[in-house]
Image (tube, rainbow, N blue to C red):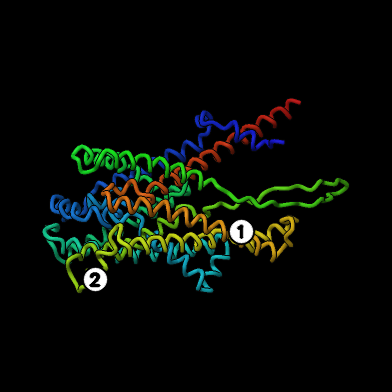
Amino acid sequence: MVSAAEQLAANLNFSALGKADELKKRIWFTLGALLVYRLGTYIPLPGIDPAAWEQVFKQQAGGILGMFNMFAGGGINRMAIFALNIMPYISASIIIQLLTTVSPQLEALKKEGEAGRKTLNQYTRYLTVILAAFQSYAIAAGLQGAGNVVSEPGMFFLISTSVTLTGGTMFLMWLGEQITSRGIGNGISLIILAGIVAELPSAIANMLELGRQGALSTGLILVVIVMAVVVIAFIVFMERAQRRLLIQYPKRQVGNKMFEGQSSHLPLKLNTSGVIPPIFASSLLLLPATIASFNAGKGPEWFQWLTTQLSHGRPLFLIFYVSLIVFFAFFYTAIVFNPTETADNLKKHGGFIPGIRPGERTAEYIDYVLSRITVLGAAYLAVVCLIPEILISYASVPFYFGGTSLLIVVSVTMDTVAQVQGYLLAHQYEGLIRKSKLRGRRK
């Protein structure tokens, strides 16, 4: 028998959007915040010669700066105040989450609920300032050493650039939190999505221009387009894939009434970690690779070798990239899903998995199933991100057609649409409740 919620979901359409005032306010707030972010990517840093920096960027665009520029929404290309984007915050989140697994104090905070979460968020903000200041100074020093990019080099330029870039990151962190609480979707993910999507038309135009000039063959362009469509379809399929565990509830008596036993499912997503592993892996690789790219041609031989191997398509880069994706797929899954807590909750409500003893055995079984499907999820993420990286490296295709960018765009879009549908569903429920109350009064 179809439930009322399923009937509403089946009949859900966006024509109800005009009646959902709260949802419209959230959508307009989100769009306004993203517009502010995009404006910030066009405000250049003071003291930079745009023509000289453009020459430097063109030389490095095929390497790590190209990937950094993709996440920054073109902010690196224009060397804007938001050039660092939100990456220091993501790196700080990684470090704090790693520390919660080894530090008893941080682990205790995590278990304290809302108060503990706020404290951990505050620690993440402090660490973001430190990482942003370090990366900002590295960028400022790299700009000073990159020919005639800086018009007046010196300590004042180093300090002012570091403060500006760090302030830009902190503003974006605050903006992302505001989008999450007052808008639609995850603010940090939407900021990254907005940067990628905004630069996508120019990337397509550049690729077509390369095809017109003969730098890219028509066949290769068609292969890239077909690959992008196939990868998008594959991502949608894998993101919706679930392993459902049958949950049985026994008969129960409430007063004089006997309720029949019910069955439901515990859905386990094939990719529980979502888009987090590629973003975490990319952000961790950006820090050493950015420093190496600014100091190319300098330093000892081992540093030269490291700089070369950390560029796209190189074996060391690909090994680190895949390893970090697999690690974070398992690590983040372990953080967001606790089999022991799930088993305890099932036991409290009388639920059990047929053939599995409630309690510890159920937790072990859930963990066993989750580990097996996470292997598939990690392999899926690695394949989606690795194959385009190789194609980008050896065919000089723009970074915007890489697996990471497609994964972010598709996953974040699906999550945001799901949230919009959730708000519309809640609005329809409220309308049904009001109608039922009016009918009750008339009777």
**Tally of marks:** 2
Left or right, residue 8 beside residue 58: right
Q: In what quadrant of the picture does the N terminus appear?
A: top right
Residue 134 appears anywhere in the view: yes
Quadrant of the drawing holding the C terminus: top right
Q: What is the C-alpha distance between the residues marked 2 and 1?
A: 43 Å
Report the disc number at residue 122: none
Query: Which of 363 and 138 lies nearest the eye of the viewer?
Result: 363
Residue 184 in view: no
* Mark 1 Cα shell of 10 Å, populated few (<14), some (14-19), many (≥20): few
| Badge 2 vs badge 1, beta-carbon distance below 8 Å | no
Rendered location of residue 429, percent (x, y):
62, 36
Q: Secondary structure at mark 2?
A: helix
Query: Residue drawn 34% across and 65% down?
Result: 131
Q: Is residue 161 left or right of residue 149?
A: right
Residue ID at (20%, 66%): 295
Of the numbered discs 2 and 1, the one sitting upstream in the chain is 2
Q: Residue at x 19, y 72 (%)?
A: 299
- Rendered location of residue 291, percent (x, y): 26, 65
The one nearer the camera, 94 or 233, is 233
Quadrant in which residue 83 is drawn: bottom left
Residue 374 spot, x, y in % from top left: 53, 58
Q: What residue sits 50% from the left and 29% below the top?
A: 18
Q: Secondary structure at mark 1?
A: helix
User: Which residue, given by chain and number where applicable, does mark 2 sit on?
Assistant: 303
Residue that numbered label 1 is attached to: 369
Where residue 47 appears, as percent x and y from the top left, is 16, 56
State whether residue 112 is above or below residue 53: below
- Image height check: is 28 above or below 114? above
Which amino acid type is shown beneath numbered disc 1? Val
Amino acid bearing label 2: Phe
Q: Decide which of 379, 64 is in the foreground and name it.
A: 379
